[in-house]
Image: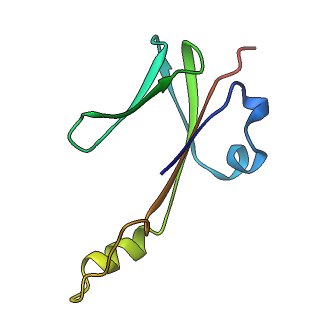
Amino acid sequence: MRLEVFDSASDVPPELLSQQPRHSFRSSSNKIALVDTEGYPALELPAPAAGTISCAVACEGREDAYKARHHEHRENIRDVERWRITIWPEQTP
């Protein structure tokens, strides 16, 4: 997994702004945590800013990971599926 945190939308690479689905959420905290599948914090970092945070999430290799996981000779699936999460504060008009 790759996590990128930018200080503003102008710092985000244009391909992420134009090609990825974008989402947003409200944050009132000065920290953001990524949690594992059981809900435990796996990584905690400073939030870009309180307010509305935009994010783009991309995943590659999901089909390859599925095939490897369900193959009769289960291959090592570590690093087959790759995630890229990018967050930045939404610009206010």
Up the image or down, 27 lies above or below 83; here it is above
Quadrant of the rendered structure where residue 72 is? bottom left
Q: Say left or right for 79 vs 3.
A: left
Q: Position of residue 57 (x, y in %)?
A: 53, 47
Q: Position of residue 82 (x, y in %)?
A: 48, 60
Front residue of 27 and 82:
82
- The residue at the far bottom in this view is 72
Quadrant of the rendered structure where residue 90 is? top right
Q: Say left or right for 25 vs 93.
A: left
Residue that appears at 45% across and 12% down = 29
Q: Say left or right for 83 vs 41.
A: right
| Label tally | 0
Up the image or down, 72 lies above or below 60; here it is below
Up the image or down, 76 lies above or below 20; here it is below
On-image quarter of the C terminus: top right
Q: Position of residue 83 (x, y in %)?
A: 49, 54
Residue that appears at 56% across and 19% down = 52
Color theme of the render: rainbow
Residue that appears at 75% across and 44% down = 13
Quadrant of the rendered structure where residue 14 is? top right
